[in-house]
């Protein structure tokens, strides 16, 4: 591969922009704020996330990729353009880089084309897509080109992608719309039901990260949580325990375990035997939930590992591909001269 290469992990929760030479350049939340009357984008990334839930009526805030699919194409493409400019400046764009973009596996053909169009519009010379589970597996250092099956489970914000990879391709893959966001939502719902207190999305996510636990062997005690009492309408504070979070997360985590099991059930026996030997690798921000590896290991009777820097695994995979001559695992490369 020659020329300027820019890689983008367009995640439902976070977007990472990287280059062949410099590695990861920016890592920001996939959020936008815009004027709903004109659809003009006002801010993206951290700036937009900080406004989320606090915007006045004349400003709307959204996550354009919320459920693992592109909820709003126009805003996604604007966000993409702003991130690219922010990461590499206008000068690289003038020299027309080649883009390698990783998008959630569950998106439709129409959405894939739409992302490519957006990237071309942003100034790219060519756009190649890479399938998320393949990028995650490469980033995690799995030997994907060997005739040995490996299983990678990427738990992002909107989707969990379970994939069995062998000989550089995806032998089995299932995409589930239950991942980090659903865990966060389950925490809000639990607190509302148990304490009659409403909390915001970012508070729920902070609790998950601070004392979240998927297995009794990881317990972080107690944290104080603030929100609004539904009955009195007044601000309220209460203590919440790691064990409460475990209870709250039971349903979404069971769905994730179930999808891993059903994927294994439909995997050819030879590949199953490889997975038995090598175990399962967890990637994505959701893999940072403490005790999740232990829970999955207990339920599947397999070895489970969390990759190094699970957040960056997909981006690291894209970087490795851009640095190698591994063109065969890129899909749907389009070019405009
Ligand atoms: P995506 O690829 O969809 O953009 P990421 O791989 O960036 O998603 O992961 C984002 C998810 O990881 C969010 O739901 C976030 O709450 C969750 N997450 C991040 N850090 C932690 C942590 N320490 N514990 C549990 N969940 C975490
Ligand atoms: Mg991801």
Image: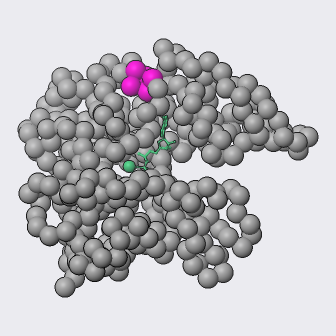
Quadrant where the C terminus sits is: bottom left
The residue located at (61%, 42%) in the rendering is: 185
Residue 257, position in %: x, y?
A: 42, 31
User: Above or below — where is 38 with respect to 222?
Assistant: below
Quadrant where the N terminus sits is: bottom left
User: Above or below — where is 41 with respect to 66?
Assistant: below
Residue 80 visible somewhere in the drawing: no
> Foreground: 91 or 136?
91
Report the span colored magenta.
291-295
Q: Which colouring convention does the figure follow?
A: one colour
The residue located at (31%, 25%) in the rendering is: 304
Residue 53, position in %: x, y?
A: 68, 56
Residue 111, position in %: x, y?
A: 38, 69
Residue 294 is one of the magenta-drawn residues: yes
The residue located at (50%, 71%) in the rendering is: 75
User: Above or below — where is 151 with respect to 31?
Assistant: above
Side of 228 where 150 appears, left or right = left
Side of 56 where 316 appears, left or right = left
Residue 52 visible somewhere in the drawing: yes
Query: Which residue lies most toward the bottom here?
Result: 337
Q: How many marks?
A: 0
The residue located at (25%, 67%) in the rendering is: 99
Q: Mainly helix, strand or loop, the magenta region?
A: helix
* Among the 4 quarters of the image, the one containing residue 203: top right
Side of 247 where 115 appears, left or right = left
User: Above or below — where is 168 with respect to 293?
Assistant: below
Side of 174 where 211 appears, left or right = right
Residue 255 is one of the magenta-drawn residues: no
Residue 300, position in %: x, y?
A: 35, 23
């Amino acid at each position: 591969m020659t020329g300027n290469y820019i890689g983008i992990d367009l995640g439902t929760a976070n977007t990472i922009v990287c280059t062949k030479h410099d590695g990861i350049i920016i890592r920001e939340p996939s959020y936008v704020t815009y004027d709903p009357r004109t659809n003009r984008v006002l801010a993206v990334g951290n700036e937009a996330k900080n406004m989320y839930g606090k915007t006045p009526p004349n400003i709307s805030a959204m996550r354009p990729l919320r459920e693992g699919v592109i909820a709003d194409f126009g805003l996604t493409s604007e966000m993409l353009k702003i991130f690219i400019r922010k990461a590499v400046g206008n000068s690289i764009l003038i020299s027309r880089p080649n883009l390698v973009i990783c998008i959630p596996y569950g998106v439709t053909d129409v959405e894939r084309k739409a992302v490519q169009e957006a990237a071309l519009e942003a100034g790219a010379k060519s756009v190649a897509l890479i399938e998320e589970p393949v990028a995650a597996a490469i980033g995690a250092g799995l030997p994907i080109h060997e005739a040995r099956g490996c299983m990678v489970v990427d738990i992002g914000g909107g989707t969990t992608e379970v994939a069995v990879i062998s000989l550089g391709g995806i032998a089995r893959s299932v995409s589930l719309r239950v991942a980090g966001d659903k865990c966060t939502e389950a925490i809000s719902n639990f607190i509302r039901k148990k304490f009659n207190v409403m909390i915001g999305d970012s508070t729920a996510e902070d609790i998950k990260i601070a004392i979240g636990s998927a297995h009794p062997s990881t317990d972080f005690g107690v944290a104080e949580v603030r929100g609004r009492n539904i009955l009195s309408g007044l601000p309220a504070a209460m203590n919440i325990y790691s064990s409460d979070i475990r209870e709250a997360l039971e349903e979404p985590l069971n769905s994730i375990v179930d999808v891993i099991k059903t994927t294994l059930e439909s995997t050819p026996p030879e590949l199953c035997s490889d997975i038995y030997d090598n175990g399962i690798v967890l990637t994505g921000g959701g893999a940072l939930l403490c005790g999740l590896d232990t829970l999955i290991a207990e339920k599947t009777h397999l070895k489970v590992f969390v990759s190094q820097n699970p957040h960056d695994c997909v981006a690291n995979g894209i970087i490795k591909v851009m640095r190698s001559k591994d063109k065969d695992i890129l899909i749907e490369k389009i070019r405009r001269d």
